[in-house]
Image: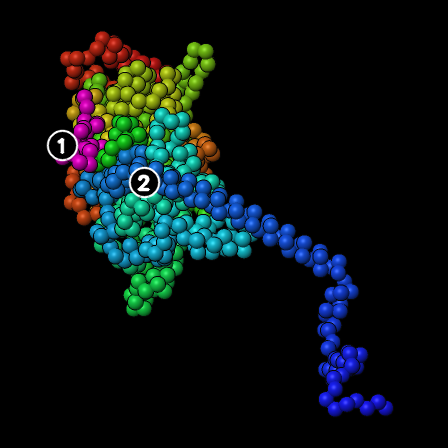
Amino acid sequence: MVNRPRGSGRLVAEKRTSQSRTTSDRKKAAPKKTKPKSARKARNAPKRGLISGMFFGFLGLIWRVLWGFGWRIGMVVSLLIGAGVLYIYTTLPPVSELVDGRARGSVTLMDRNGAVFAWRGDQFGGMITADTVSPYLRDAIVATEDKRFYYHIGVDPIGIASAVKINLSEGRGPLSGHGGSTITQQTAKLLCLGVPFDPNGGMTEAEYENDCRQTTLWRKIKEAVFALAMEAKYSKDEILTIYMNRAFLGAGARGFEAASQRYFGKSASAVTPAESAMLAGLLKAPTRYAPTNNLERSQQRAGIIVGLMEDQGYLTTSQASTARTNPAQLSEAAEAKAGGYFADWVMSDGPEFFTRETTEDVIIKTTLDQRIQKAGEDAMKQIFEEKVSEGSKAQAAIVVMSADGAVRAMVGGRKTQVSGVFNRATSAKRQTGSAFKPFVYATALELGHHWNSTVVDEPYTIDIPGSGPWSPENYTRKHYGRVTLEYALANSLNIPAVKVSEAVGRENVRRIASDFGIDSDLAEGPALALGASESTLIEVTGAYAGILNGGSSVEPYGLTELRLLEDNEPVMGTEGGIGERVIREEAARELIYMMSKVVSEGTGGRAKLPDGREAAGKTGTTSAARDAWFVGFTADYVAGVWMGYDDNTPLKGVTGGGLPAEIWRETMTRVHDGMPAKPLPMLRPAPAPAPQNRELPAPSNRQTSENPVDTVLRDVLNSIFGAGN
């Protein structure tokens, strides 16, 4: 061991060794550090970390690129939308110019007492606003169509998302079914994005409206832009005002004022919660939920709306309960289903530019008596329910008019609560059968013969050139010998009618019938006397009215006054009424007497009225019973009834003296209920007059205006009938 002097320094080697040892000692003294397993694994898989980094880096790059393009594209789209909104904003007119968007006008029809009973065309009841309409109705619309209406900017993303979700859950396309449109967007659609209908634009009105209702994505985008412009231009109440005035609500009603008047007979400012709910419920499907189509379905829909109003705080629990317990009911005019056949006839018979094609709002006063109309409808219903087999397709028609031709009621078929369907009272041309015979006897009476002139009922044959011999037969297949004209008509004998027609001249019979108003083509041959010609019920009834009024022709009419809505002076007046004289009053009085015997003693016995009220008329049954008629009158009214099948199927066991006469009796009994009985304006001969022994004597009252043909025919009457051919 080497001793170092005290205080001497350490050797360099020793120092290094010492330092080395010290360092080694520190390392040994320090705790051993270990790397986590994840780090070891990372060192063992260097390739995977590289791929991940590249992947996420690529995603980041794509995101940066998309973001770069996205905000630029968004900016461009926003600028385009803004430009579109600004442009549309500058084109939007004042609200007052947008409330009435109809391409057609309307026709309001009133009865003889001035009560409205029907509407035609596009009805617009007048402008209403969000301030003047019933608050219940305003709230019902918002609750039903757009509960966030007062909070969005014209487009409601929440509503759209909800609608898309519902559509997809129901298996439809995202834009099919529920649209999620706001009231503002719906108003944009009603305005057809500001493009008005152009009659000369190559589209019909229906095609134009279908185009406006498109639901394509591009259309929805344009609607959204238009809605934003509207929100910028108008207040919420102004937008709601446009919507309430332009919405179609069924039965030709445009706007809630027209609908309220149409269904409830009151202004939209006065509707109740129940009525408001029913009106708002129409917005979903106007035709389906129109109360005139199905009141019960409309009430059920209204119940849903009441629930929405209650949930959203527009109705208290008590108000909602009252609305459910007392659902809205139709007005009497609405229950009449828009006037049915009569209204259709007036519209088709009036001037086209003021009715079917009017661009103005027109008021038409008519001859209709709603009490008499109901009498006819109820009578037909009763007879068919009680006396016609269930499932029968037989049809019937009724016309009631005054002696001057003013039509008081019209039933064009068994289904009375309809409109726009085939009207058998005015359009069906059918053979008249024996209902034509009064015009044969009117001709004889006009030539100076009388009710008690006689004719021989016997086998009779006429040789028709080109057709051969023709032998008419009575319905009973019997012959009654010498009979008076009164008896022949009362019992509807065919052979005497033909013999009289041939004696007085078919041309004269044809002229008399035509002058009385039977305008249809009349048969040329001898079967003319038996009603072989076709005519309409309204023509025949009008001709009988000429007999009742003393022998003057009438033109059946339904229109008495036509004026424009804003005018007090009528544009036109009565179309129709009493025309020229056809036969002498004395001849008409004799004919009425003869026709009264049809009811009191002849084939029309079932038409006899209660309480001894006098009535006259004539039955009619055509070949093979394809048509059955009864047309007759009292001192107050004339009524005609036709019955048959549309396809000419023969009636089974029905003649004019059967069911038609019963329908006539039931109708006229109701019509005259409460009215004093008046005597018929007829001849009243002395009791039990003795029959004359000569046949069709020479006229005792010749007219100075008698033409030469009539004179010749009159002079040969006795010789013709004496021959018995």
Q: Provide residue 102's location: percent of width, then percent of height.
A: 30, 36
Say if the magenta span includes residue 575: yes
Residue at 53 percent across and 49 percent down: it is: 67
Q: Residue furthest right?
A: 1
Highlighted range, magenta: 559-580
> What is the crowding at mark 2: few (fewer than 14 residues within 10 Å), some, or many (at least 20)?
some
Nearer to me, 352 or 143: 143
Among the two numbered marks 2 and 1 on one chain, the one whose residue lies closer to the N terminus: 2
Q: Provide residue 49's location: percent of width, then percent of height.
A: 71, 60
> What is the crowding at mark 1: few (fewer than 14 residues within 10 Å), some, or many (at least 20)?
few
Secondary structure type for disc 2: helix
Q: Which residue is mark 2?
A: 89
Q: Amino acid at mark 2?
A: Tyr
Q: Which residue is mark 1?
A: 569
Q: Quadrant of the C terminus?
A: top left
- Chosen colour scheme: rainbow
Residue 59's disc number: none
Residue at 39 percent across and 30 percent down: it is: 204
Cα gap from disc 2 to disc 1, whole angstroms: 42 Å
